[in-house]
Image: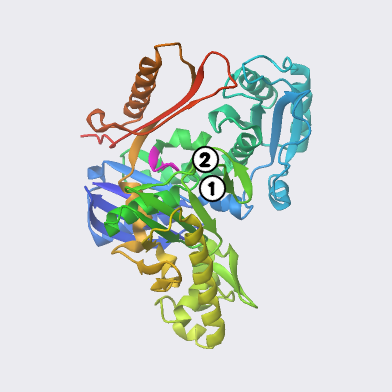
Amino acid sequence: MRIGIDVGGTNTDAVLLDGRQVLASVKTSTTADVTSGIVAAIDGLQRQRAFDPAAVRAVMIGTTHFINALVEAHRLAPTAAVRLSLPAGASLPPMVDWPQRLVDAVSGRSYLVHGGHEFDGRHIAELDESELRKAADDMGAAGVRSVAITSVFSPVNAEFETRAAEIIGAQLPDVAISLSHEIGRIGLLERENATVINAALRELAAHIVDGLSASVTGAGITAPLYLSQNDGTLMDVDFARRYPVATFASGPTNSMRGAAILSGLDTCAVVDVGGTTSDVGVLRQGFPREATTDVSVAGIRTNFRMPDVLSIGIGGGSRVRGIVTVGPDSVGYELTSKALVFGGDTLTATDIAVAAGRAEIGDPSLVSHLDKALVRAALDRIAAEVSDVVERMRTSAEPLPVVAVGGGSVLLPDELAGCGEVHRPENYAVANAIGAAIAQIGGEVDRVYVIEPGRREAVVDEAKQEAVDRAVAAGASPASVGIVDFDEVPIPYLPGNATRIRVKAVGDLQLGA
């Protein structure tokens, strides 16, 4: 048995699986402290289908907390961006393309320091350690609690980032440090953006991960705990503390994997309507289509690997206003106290669904006064915005079936204009928890190799074997591991026949006896 849990901004969903059979499923409200919501979900599973906690082999948790925190510009740590690039790279400062509200939310400070590499590994300038110490003094005085360090071409040579982290860490021992070569790819601004986002989320990550661990052990479960990554694979809790950005889009990724299993469709568009956002992605052969370009997250361009997902701020907790606008802000986990149907004073999308007879939640009499034209206009607005996103995700003229999952999918009509029938499979409301529970373990290699004449096959085999070894080391069953993705891109502007090779291996989680 294994338990899959999805902690959304509004609801916490949980499923108990035996193999791929759903033994029990529950949906409870997410709580401000995270922990009690998960405890309630596990208790709900226990009440629905009694089980021995010792018989649970693994717990997988997917959370949208981190992406929601960024979208809502909430609970982000005061963050500094340090770029090692001078005398080059000064014309576009860090966070230059960020929405101002997010710069304000992270109290964004930036520092340009001498250093960085050319594309062939030569130094642009030597690292100026006195500049770094001066910057660290300024950060300390300003109350910075997290630092993102980015050096030009650090994926080719990371020595300056590593040294800069040592210097800043020595002066500011309590500050969390994120290094760009561990997070993004070649492409300075986008890699830097991803690293600053990761840095801003580090404090929240520690809080969330500690809460998740405490809630699972508090339920008497001693099985290992994993978090879902944005590529549909799992990571352990220590990795999640350091790289919260790796959870971005894990919710919709889990939903898509869950949708594939529940609907039996392995090629389709999946619309996951949660409490805060609606996420639209495309499944190909049962796995999410990955983005091939820079991915914009909350209006910020990034270049770490992500599923091709478009998110809009429409969900069950979205606020509905005047000349009808829905979202992007949401009451989130406070839905059960703020929505009209629960006696609150805020008009939400859930109230609209209840007034339209699409959902039976709370007290319907509390929304009976709503103008029918307002209800219809809000539903039409939601359908139009979701339909537009599905259309934007299509890459061919071929019809693409639409599968709706997530508790908020009651907001969608039975047919979407231009997209046809909307499929809602059994257990659709907890598809993301099911996707988390059946997630696999991955290993990835993404590196620039110098390939000597006649050595290509040996280098490719070496990279593939390393990816397989990493998956096994992360907990995959050796017999189940296979290569699921392979990219080989010659880099003509690097010397020595340089080629970037990326290999991804995936296998089933090896459960303990």
Say which residue appears at 48% left-offset and 66% top-offset: 387
| Residue 90, position as x, y percentages in the image | 78, 31
Q: Nearest the camera: 389 or 354?
A: 389
- Residue at which label 1 appears: 66
For the residue labelled by badge 2, is the local secondary structure a helix, a strand or a loop?
A: helix
Rendered image quadrant of residue 154: top right
**Location of residue 358 with respect to 445 vertically, above or below:** below
* Kind of residue at badge 2: Pro
- Is residue 123 shown above or below 298? above
Q: Amino acid at mark 1?
A: Phe
**119 lies left or right of 124:** left
Q: Quadrant of the C terminus?
A: top left
Q: Is residue 232 magenta?
A: yes
Q: Which residues are magenta?
A: 228-234
Vertical order, 454 against 164 (above or below): above
Q: Is residue 202 shown in magenta?
A: no
User: Quick check: can you spot residue 397?
Assistant: yes
- Give the x, y percent position of residue 289: 42, 46
Name the residue that disc number 2 marks: 244
Q: Are marks 2 and 1 in contact (CB under 8 Å)?
A: yes
